[in-house]
Amino acid sequence: MTAANDRRVAVGRIAGLFGVRGWLKVYSYTDPRDNVVSYSPWYLVLDGQSRQVKVLSGRAHGDTVVALIEGVQDRDAAAALVGSEIEVDRAVFGKAGREQFFWADLQGMKVQTLAGESLGVVDHLFETGANDVMVVVGERRHLVPFLYGRVVTGVDAEQRLITVDWDPGF
């Protein structure tokens, strides 16, 4: 496995309880949001402790997702998990297609301009509705639109480097 595949990625968090039979409300970071239940096993991380669990069932429910995991059969057991971050092995996502990228793979990559000037590293990304935006942190903070082929001219996974057509003063 490569370094990118040899790690875990946060895909959501346990946000609350649903019913009395151990179902959990999940705030999903995935798109579409109910994809979170298709990734198994989950690693629930709470207070520095990690616990591997198997997802038994799940579905979209309003603005959240509800899920049932193995070994959680009542509301009290479920309540102990509220606040847990849900992580999965990066390998469950498989390989991105041509000119497709997983945000988790872009985070931590170095970003440089066409002239070779370093802007910093990708701290995180967010959606605006129009396009995704990379938050690049270096000597200063840059908000760079992730427009592949226009602003982002290259992504080198091996070198962990993103090249952008971007004014470093912006």
Image: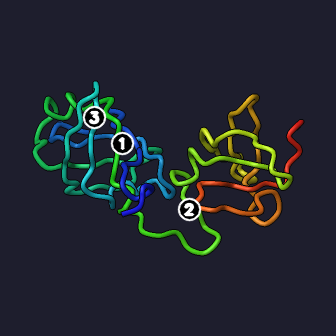
Numbered tag placed on residue 116 in the rendering:
none
- Calculate the distance from the C-alpha at mark 1 to the C-alpha at mark 2: 34 Å
Label 3 amino acid?
Leu
In this rendering, the label closer to the viewer, 2 or 3: 2
Q: Is residue 132 left or right of residue 6?
A: right
- Residue 148 is situated, as x and y percent measured from the top left of the image, at 74, 63
Is 120 located above or below residue 8 in the figure? above
Is 7 located above or below residue 98 in the figure? above
- Residue 123 is situated, as x and y percent measured from the top left of the image, at 60, 38
The front one of 126 and 78 is 126
At x 36% / y 55%, what residue is drawn? 6
Tag 3 residue: 17
At x 76% / y 45%, what residue is drawn? 144
- Calculate the distance from the C-alpha at mark 1 to the C-alpha at mark 3: 9 Å
Secondary structure category for the residue under label 2? loop
- Residue 29 is situated, as x and y percent measured from the top left of the image, at 47, 46
* Quadrant position of residue 15: top left
At x 41% / y 61%, what residue is drawn? 2
- Residue 18 is situated, as x and y percent measured from the top left of the image, at 27, 39
- Counting residues from the start of the chain, the first of labels 1 and 3 encountered is 3
Q: Residues within 10 Å of mark 1 (few under 14, many from 20)?
A: many
Do callouts 2 and 3 mark residues in contact (Cβ within 8 Å)?
no
Tag 2 residue: 158
Secondary structure category for the residue under label 1? strand
Is 97 located above or below residue 15 in the figure? below
- Calculate the distance from the C-alpha at mark 2 to the C-alpha at mark 3: 42 Å
Label 2 amino acid?
Glu
How many numbered marks appear? Answer: 3
Tag 1 residue: 26
Label 1 amino acid?
Val
Q: Residues within 10 Å of mark 2 (few under 14, many from 20)?
A: few
